Amino acid sequence: MKKLLEKIKRLSPELRKEVEDFVEFLEKKYSSKRGGSLEIIKFRGALQELGERYTSVELQHKILEFWEK
């Protein structure tokens, strides 16, 4: 854990924000009562073309918005 924190501290503020967003995404993903991780596997690759239009952080925010509904 200490190594991870040291690496995060060396990142730029923008990258630290991406790490924070990703951690929040993982927390939501694994604490969700809407099907859990197996539900996500069924759709793996289904929206791959969105990766060409949006950054991973933007997609994570959209997923979180969807799950909160």
Image (tube, rainbow, N blue to C red):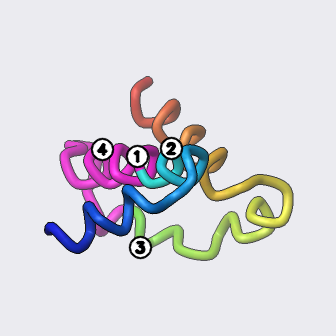
Q: Is residue 19 left or right of residue 59?
A: left
What kind of element bears circle 1?
A: helix
Indicate which disc residue 64 carries: none
State the residue at coordinates (38%, 56%): 9
Q: Which of the two marks, 2 or 3, is nearer to us in this view?
A: 2
Give the x, y percent position of residue 15.
56, 54
Whole-angstrom CA distance, mark 3 to mark 4, is 16 Å
Q: Residue at x 52, y 68 (%)?
A: 43
- Rendered image: mark on residue 20: 1
State if disc 2 and disc 4 touch (CB < 8 Å): no
Q: Earlier in the sequence, mark 3 or mark 1?
A: 1
Residue placed under numbered mark 2 in the picture: 17
> Disc 3 on helix, strand or loop?
helix
* Vertical side of 69 occupied by 57: above or below: below
The residue indicated by pointer 3 is 41
Of mark 4 and mark 1, the one earlier in the sequence is: 1
- Given the image, on which type of amino acid does mark 2 rest? Lys
